[in-house]
Amino acid sequence: MWTWVAHRITGVAVFFFLLVHVLDTALVRVSPSAYDAVIATYKTPIVNLMEVGLVGAVLFHALNGIRIILVDFWSKGTRLQRQMTWTIVAIWLVLMVPGAYFMLIHTVENLFGSTS
Amino acid sequence: MSAPALNAPKTARSGGRTNYEMWSWVFMRVSGIVLVFLVLGHLLIMNILDGGVQRINFAFVAGRWSSPFWQVWDLLQLWLAMIHGANGLRTIINDYSERDQTRFWLKAALLTATVFTIALGTLVIFTFDPNIS
């Protein structure tokens, strides 16, 4: 049940980001400086944190989508669907921890100083 | 005075649009699998590897779109993600909007945004000019 709710919420959120993302990328057709200006906002701390949320949402939607396909087509899918839910939660955590680290490292170093 | 014309009685649905929802269901699964690779690959390259978003600028985009491989990748990703997402939102609109009028206008807005975004993105990929100033 909650995976179904989360699948909808993450799907809608990613779709609306996609609309915005095509618009911001379209600025490459206006001028390099217009594009670089909008991309600069992607590099600010708050938006950078939102990107981690976006990647987390897409990753959950992808993993849960695979689980749905396995429930539909795999003969053992229905019986193992609960175990698969915990499997995708585990995979999500394993990928998100290093993913979030590499996404945020630059911002964290900028905000709190860096020795390098 | 003649009797008003009546519509033909409704028959059980057969053929015609009955397969539409089935194909929509198939499309969500097929496009979903392809998008797992395209979108997670895109996010890995753009947000995580080699400095992530901090290294993205116009020159970076120009470098990528000089290769037909990434042009095709982005074009396929654009179309599949937009149609997959629009079809998902269509399902959600059908589920939650209770009045026919609400449903109609929400779907009209969804279709407009989807067609516009796919057209704009496609135009940008095909007409990209690295020497624009």
Image (spheres, rainbow, N blue to C red):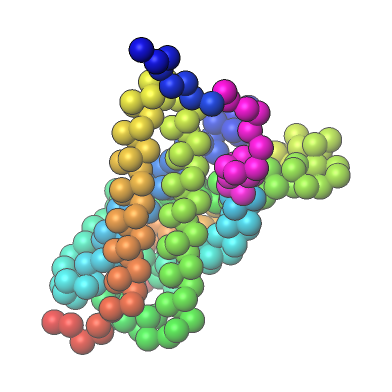
Q: Residue at x 35, y 43 (%)?
A: B110
Q: Residue at x 70, y 47 (%)?
A: A69
Q: Which quadrant of the structure image shows residue B63?
A: bottom left
Q: Position of residue B3 (x, y in %)?
A: 42, 14
Q: Which one is nearer the viewer's eye here, B108 or B35?
A: B108
Q: Which one is nearer the viewer's eye here, B96 or A74?
A: B96
Image quadrant in which the N terminus of chain A is located: top right
Q: Residue at x 58, y 57 (%)?
A: B31
Q: Residue at x 80, y 36 (%)?
A: A78
Q: Could you tell whether B56 is left or right of A14 in the image? A: left
Q: Which segment is the magenta one?
A: B9-24
Q: Position of residue A56 (x, y in %)?
A: 50, 48
Q: Could you tell whether B63 is left or right of B90 in the image? A: left
Q: Position of residue A34 (x, y in %)?
A: 16, 68
Q: Position of residue A7 (x, y in %)?
A: 55, 38
Q: Which one is nearer the viewer's eye here, B97 or B133?
A: B97
Image quadrant in which the C terminus of chain A is located: bottom left
Residue A6, relative to residue A107: is it above or below? above
Residue B71, relative to residue B15: is it above or below? below
Q: Inspect this view and state whether residue B5 appears.
A: yes
Q: Which quadrant of the structure image shows residue A83?
A: top right
Q: Could you tell whether A75 is left or right of B51 in the image? A: right
Q: Which quadrant of the structure image shows residue B12?
A: top right
Residue, far right: A75
Q: Inspect this view and state whether residue A101 appears.
A: no
Residue B18 part of the magenta segment: yes
Q: Could you tell whether A77 is left or right of B61 in the image? A: right
Residue A1, relative to residue A32: is it above or below? above
Q: Which one is nearer the viewer's eye here, B73 or B56?
A: B73
Residue B126, relative to residue B121: is it above or below? below
Residue, far front: B1
